[in-house]
Image (cartoon, rainbow, N blue to C red):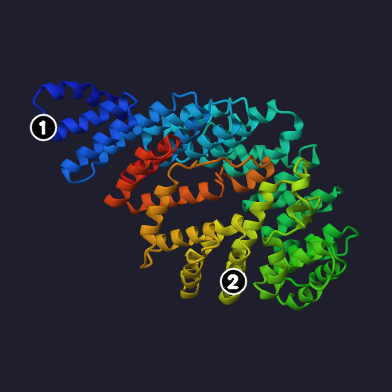
Amino acid sequence: MMQHMRVQFLIALSSLSLLSGATPLEEAKMHALFLMQNNDVEGALSRYEQYSSLSGRHDFETLQQMGLILLQKGIQTQNPQTHLMTLFGAGISGCSGSLEILERGIIYPDPQVQLLSLHFIAGFEDDRSDELLHRAMSSDYLSTRMEAAFYLAQRKHPHALGQIEGLMFRLPPVFKPYFPSFFAILGTTDATAALKRLIEDPDPQVRVESILNIARLGRDDFLPQLKRKLSHSHVAEIEATIFAIGALKDSDSTSKLKKLIHAPVESIRLAASLALLQLGDRSGVPVIIELAKRHYLFAILALGTVSDSEEILKEMLQTADFQVKINTALALLQRRDPASIPVLLEILIQDARDFAFQPIGSMGRTLTAFKAIPSAELREKDPTVNLGYSLALREHFLRETIHLPEEHFLSLARTIFQKQQNDLVPTLITLLENLRTEGAIALLKEGAGKISAPFIRDYCHLALYRLKIEGPYEEYINHWVMQQKNGELIRLRPLLPWKYRMEQSDYQLSPEETSRLLIDSFVAIANRRDEKSISLLLNAMQHGNPQNRYALIGLLMKATE
């Protein structure tokens, strides 16, 4: 607020300065601010250009002031796209003055916009951001309230417990299993007491979630309570307890676990075998192998955690059952075995079968496998098919391939380029950049020469530019950006189901193809933080898509902070 008042004060003085003998330099600066305040963005940028030309350099403070004015104007418009771009610009600017702009986002009647605003607000560590998180707990949208509760718990805010408990009691009982994670993250004495009550809740799903969150956060202070549950009659609760005992490394429970590997329920036998393995005891490995050979999908994927399981997995890879094959390949990928690649390519490269991939879980939610669903586009309205999450899984599997021997990873990467699997290209480019080996750079140069695959060609140029490899890459990206400057910069990813969003813990944007490449390019240019890059961003703001300027000013403010 103080920064905003200072800008307003400077603007108020601008007309006086024109009458009081101000230098041409001062006059140009104040006039640029005056024009921006009066919504003449093109005129303001043109006047600033004159000012920077006169001074011989860019004035970072003035750019910050102009940016804040533009964002304050943008958030007052009724255009939904302008509103969205303004929030994005305010969020990435990192400017403390942008909090009052982001505040408008958490009351905007769209859950995606509210979540985007919360994501950025949570990046500020001050009393004002705490206040806005509390305000978000009153949103009309449950997803917003749950997200705000997560951030308050993460911060261990002193009022978080009351807010979270209040929300839990107001919601129908079906939502109660989502709350143990908040109390476990909060971790205060009172939150621990609340978690102890939930671990004995009448609803078995609440008890299971409480146990799982205790395990994930390493809360070994709950071990005495957990041990008593090993003889519980509810299958899901026993499975979750076994998982927790293994995760918390309770070697005192070894004898009980050895009895449970002979239980009549497959999930219990497998969970006990895996818990023993975590305790350094391989007596349950034959049980895992036996279950895997019977095509129990959870056991197949679990073999990925068992050393010396490669040969068994390679034998199982010969099956005609595709569900078995994909889980076998993913287990081999965990073992970092290149034998996984042929089936991985069937997962990563889309073909006429049009597979979507979804996780499946055991009753106690400690065992996971994956299922391929054919003809996904035709089943778009099927609630069991989530195309956005399927893409996120394929991106995850691709990221895991970086652990394969380099020559095999590069061979897989080359195939993705050859098949022009564009939805995976941004993730693959990031992997190649991080690898930074001669082979990776050679493949990026090869991709940069692909005339018939412009999306891949452009992304490879961007990667080489970011890596500062000698060549025409900077010139290419600058030219490409100016050609595309009228394109739409950002689109929001459809909301994932809450249970998947909790795993990610924050909201993400997923611009599509050219839009994603364009924003990645602008971010790379802004990160250079030099005079040439700042001039290019200003040029794009002045002559490009007017909707984009609100996001671009955020990048510019970040680059000049």
Disc 2 packing (10 Å; few <14; some 14–19; many ≥20): many
Q: Which residue is pictured at 83% across the width and 58% down the height?
A: 268
The residue under label 1 is: 23
Quadrant assignment, res 75: top left
Note whether residue 158 is visible.
yes
What amino acid is at disc 2?
Phe
Inter-mark Cα distance, 1 to 2: 61 Å
The structure residue drawn at horizontal position 24% and vertical position 39%, both measured from the top left corner, is 49
In percent of width and height, residue 322 lies at 81, 63
Q: Dot 1: what SS?
A: loop
- The image quadrant where one finds the C terminus is top left
Q: Which of disc 2 and disc 1 is earlier in sequence?
A: 1
127 versus 234 height, above or below: above
> Depth-wise, is mark 1 or mark 2 nearer the camera?
1
From this view, report whether residue 90 is shown above or below residue 275.
above
Q: Please tell me which residue lies in front, 91 or 62.
A: 62
Tell me the kind of residue under disc 1. Answer: Thr
Q: Position of residue 406 (x, y in %)?
A: 56, 74
Q: Where does the image place residue 292, in percent across and percent down from the top left?
A: 83, 67
Indicate whether 106 appears above or below 58: above
| Image quadrant containing the N terminus | top left
Q: Residue at the spot x=39%, y=48% of the render? A: 482
Residue 409 numbered tag: 2
